Image (cartoon, grey):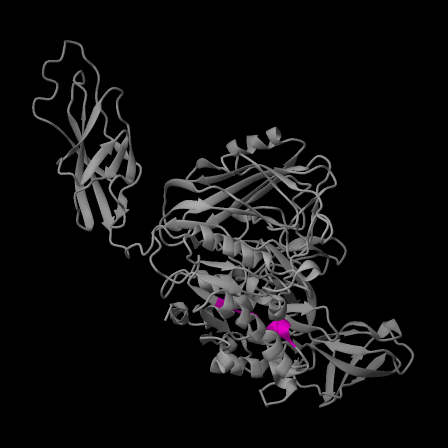
Amino acid sequence: MEIGFTVASGAGAGLGIGSSTLLKALTLSNFTFDNNDEPGVVIGTIGNRTERSTLTVVPNDGRFLIDGDNLVVGPSASSAGEIAVYVRETLPEAINSPRETRFALVKEEVPPAVDPDRYMFFGSRARMPSGNIVTAAAGTNYVCSKIIISSPQYKTRTFKFHLPGFASTEGGNSPQETIVTGTVGAPGNSVIVDALYARIAGVFYQCKFGGNNGVTVADQTNGQWTDDLTTSDVAPESDIELWLFYHTAVGEKIWPVYRVQKHRGERIWGANDNASLLGFMADPLADSTAALDTGYGTQAQPQYYGPDAFMVAKGDWDGRPVALAFVDSIGESRQEYSAAADARGMIGWLRRWLDKDASIGRIPFCMIGMPGAGSVREYTGSGATIATRRRDIIREIIAFNGGEWPFTVVVNQLGQNDTSTSYNTWFNTNYRSNVTRIRAEYPGVKIVAFTPLGRTDIQRNVTLTSVGTVATATVATGTAGLQTGQTLSISGATPAAYNGSYVITVVDANTFRYNFAGGTSPATGTIRANDLGLSADYQLYTAQNSYPADGTDASGKWRLRNDIVAKTSACCDDAIDTYTSWVSSVKAGAWPGMLELPSTALTAQSGTDGVVTYNTITVADASIFRPEQQINIYSGPEGVARLSTQVVGSISGNVITYQGPSAVVLPIGSVVRPSPAAQEASTPISLVHPYPVVIDRIVAGIAQSEKTKLQAA
């Protein structure tokens, strides 16, 4: 900081009568540098300099130099800590020349750069191309996508970005790279990239492609790399905006990559021509184009093209682990999409845990997987089953990286989608197959595996009879976890009058009753009763998820956990056990019920007559929620008779805005409970993907000290 000035003895000597030029106090744009900064590195830009003046450093001992308007590191050594330096400004005609401004610089002691010439993965917000293909519409076939990547906890300065010519499918065949603009084996349209800029600290740097401003990305190719982009040093934990301008003809296809995170300043703009988009460079927070900005904070939000997760950077990498992460939907992001992202763009429990600033610090990573990914399909296949393009892109990085990997450790979160009715197939044929390929591809790499999360049903099969308007449900698996006065959702019954959400009375260990409109008895169909995850005791273990591991195929999930922890058959070199971070406190192997999770209450009534709609509620403490969290509102004070189920769209103070409207009257004191996980559209409905409340529980529950396992042996 600028903390004073002096005017040298004899200032103004020899001036002509009437001189009025007065030198001002100088300013400096930055005051910190570190022990990794080599001579010539800019510390800060000097401001308030008078035209035609000269600048010198006092004392002129070589520790610092002037380069134009910049104060730079000099060739002489300096000590860590606070350093006082004077910058002398001289202008003969000024009445107070020479004038000295004192700056208090701070030299920080940071770990020495391990390999400043090695490209390493750094864009932890970035993701792989995957999802649903996007079709260019009239009026928006020219597009600018702006995403924001937060840099690691060390300086970076030289970058390479990658644009893909494919995307992976999400779902049963994932991660096969078969989302293409044509058909597999018959390439479709290319995507024309008009320009790519990196905006850092307000300055736009244009990326080049073989010296050109733009490039054509052909379908069913690995894609295109930018040339090396070297900038001024990018400070640790800085935001790097990536502005991609691209186009196709109307009706042509574009590979999906990003759901923009608007609350972080990310945007998606469309127009009839590229020139119309360039104006946003002067207005970077202008609203996204409405026609492209749909489904925000939901799975339906479109995913737009942009530089993928293979972005790499050189800089003052300090030797901390950098991870190549093999993941599926549970690790990659779900159940979060965009609006739930934190300040650095992290969504999902694994991203948030790796990026948390604790223990050995934030761990940079490249998540090479996506929703649906399974070990048996990863890094293998060809033609209609190809899943090797991403592997080959990493080979390209290694080639221009002097033979060095852009990572130091492999994280393996896969396992959920390797399920089989035979545990031998699950573990040996499926799960370990990709481990074998990883070890062959990266000889000697350390593999750290995370144990899987559980899967439980929240519906139980029932039979229904009735007398008049009283229905009696018989539950062969029991009524454990149910209580009189709570709401259950009944589905699958004929006549349909039996179906709906009803407040029940528990009769005994296998029976409950509820009032309804009446109907033929007995009801027919596959009838299920769902408590929406209110109580862990009501949950049932799904197939291959029976707890505890007992050596049978039925307990395959927990046998996998045990084998990972034991590092059986070299399936990993170390393990991080997730179990205690997410599991219920009342039932082993089950998800926590809403009754175990934080809750709050309405402080003002919402709704008036059950007809007029609203979309906000005011609660005592909204800090336990974030956007995209499903919430259930129950009658107070017991909080078990359900009134409404909604999804949080946004939060301001203690006011929660829903994603959609509601007309249900919610009195003061109504209890608001977060759902633990998404209800998967399966039969029966089950809990698999954690909602934000459990994501936070997992991040807090896995000790940050476990990150030390990611360090190379």
Is residue 223 shown to the viewer in this render?
Answer: yes
Task: Examine the rendered structure and indicate whether residue 65 appears above or below residue 664.
Answer: above
In the rendered structure, does residue 569 fall within the stretch colored magenta? Answer: no
In the rendered structure, does residue 418 fall within the stretch colored magenta? Answer: yes
Q: Position of residue 20 (x, y in %)?
A: 21, 15
Q: Which residues are magenta?
A: 411-419
Q: Position of residue 434 (x, y in %)?
A: 56, 70
In which quadrant of the rendered image does the N terminus lie? Answer: top left
Q: Nearer the viewer, residue 201 or 18?
A: 201
In which quadrant of the rendered image does the C terminus lie? Answer: bottom left
Q: Is residue 623 left or right of residue 708?
A: right
Residue that sits furthest to the top in the current view = 17
Residue that sits furthest to the right in the current view = 520
Task: Examine the rendered structure and indicate whether residue 678 appears above or below residue 569.
Answer: above
Q: Residue at x 27, y 50 (%)?
A: 36
Q: Residue at x 18, y 12 (%)?
A: 19
Q: Is residue 672 left or right of residue 684?
A: left
- Corner quadrant of residue 381: bottom right
Task: Examine the rendered structure and indicate whether residue 278 appears above or below residue 127.
Answer: above
